[in-house]
Image (spheres, rainbow, N blue to C red):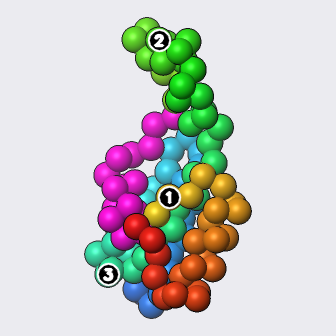
Amino acid sequence: MIALADTKKVEESQLMIALLDGVTIDSGVASEIGIAYANHIPILGLYTDSRQQGADNQQKLEALGTVAENQFHYLNLYTVGLIKLNGQVYPSEEALLEGIQQFVTQGKVDE
């Protein structure tokens, strides 16, 4: 059964790297994040969605008040919260690689 095999591999892991891009976080990835969190496994998330840019753009901010005009992308806050409680979310591949390097050399992730 895939669920048992995936769970076993996550539980055997020392580190989880989760890709968060897409219309929504992949349901399998979200489940694995929960398993990693419950087992105190550090989690590094990669989220590169360009809609996160422009937080200081007044037109973009004003559009939040118009129905169906949210120009920022939403990620499930529970899932992201589990990552942040046990790791970090990175905005670029370069930053993620730095986080991985830190984990390899120091055995921990800056939270």
Residue 12, located in which quarter of the rendered image? bottom left
Task: Name the residue carrying label 2.
Answer: 62
Q: Is residue 83 above or below residue 23?
A: below
| Residues at marks 1 and 2 touching, judged by CB atoms closer than 8 Å | no
Q: Nearer the viewer, mark 2 or mark 3?
A: 2
Q: Magenta residues: mostly which secondary structure?
A: helix
Q: Residues within 10 Å of mark 3 (few under 14, many from 20)?
A: some
Taking 6 as reference, is 27 above or below it? Answer: above
Q: Is 41 drawn above or below residue 93 in the view shown?
A: below
Residue 27 position, x and y percent, is: 45, 56
Give the percent coordinates (x, y) of residue 105.
58, 88
The magenta region covers: 73-87
Residue 71 sits in quarter: top right
Apparent side of residue 64 relative to residue 35 in the rendered image (left or right):
right
Left or right: 92 with respect to 52? right
Residue shown at the point (51%, 68%) measured from the top left? 44
Q: CA distance from mark 2 to mark 3?
A: 41 Å
Q: Which mark is residue 89?
A: 1
Q: Quadrant of the N terminus?
A: bottom left
